[in-house]
Image (cartoon, rainbow, N blue to C red):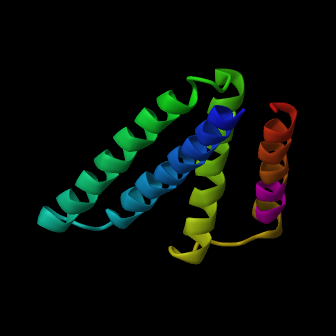
Amino acid sequence: MKRNAVHWIILILAGFCEVGFAFCLGKTKGLVGWPYWEWMGAFAFFYVLSAVLLAKATETLPIGTAYPVWTGIGALGSVLVGILIFHEPATFWRLFFITTLTASIIGLKLVSE
């Protein structure tokens, strides 16, 4: 049971890395030259780390649960980063669907114990 809990933590970290690479991608907008490549390097780092952590998490977690949770954390985090950092619109429907996505992620975690 303890090993399974560690893999859930690893999965959550993998999801945060997915948010990290989405953030880095957002920072490349409008950049040229060296600053562009710095952010792309950070993007590549988080992208690879995210995939490696996801693979580690699936050693004990079912892929049918781990993958949707991983992408859900990435989607939720990316929308929040978009709203809070990149000043994207926070419309009712965006917030509504992010709320349902969050509920789905929590539901998958609860039924996968």
**Nearest to the observer: residue 106 or residue 71:** 106
Locate residue 32, reporting x and y percent. 18, 64
Place of residue 38 in the rendered image (x, y in percent of width and height, measured from the top left): 20, 61
Vertically, is 88 above or below 108? below
Q: Which residue is drawn at 62% across and 33% down?
A: 3
Give the magenta range: 95-99
In the rendered image, the residue lying farthest to the front is 2
Is 33 on the left-hand or right-hand side of 41?
left
Q: In this view, does 61 lie above or below 98?
A: above
Taken as a whole, is the magenta stretch helix, strand or loop? helix
What residue do we see at 56% from left, 32% from top? 57
Left or right: where 11 falls relative to 68: left
Instruction: Looking at the picture, tell me which residue is in the foreground, 4 or 40.
Output: 4
Can residue 95 be seen in this snapshot?
A: yes
In terms of depth relative to the viewer, which is nearer, 69 or 24? Answer: 69
Q: Quadrant of residue 109?
A: top right
Identify the residue shown where x is 60% and y is 59%. 77
Q: In which quarter of the image is the C terminus?
A: top right
Q: How many labels does the image show?
A: 0
Residue at far left of view: 34
Say whether residue 16 is magenta: no
Q: Can residue 70 be seen in this view?
A: no
Please state the horizontal and vertical placement of residue 1, each as a whole percent of the image: 72, 32
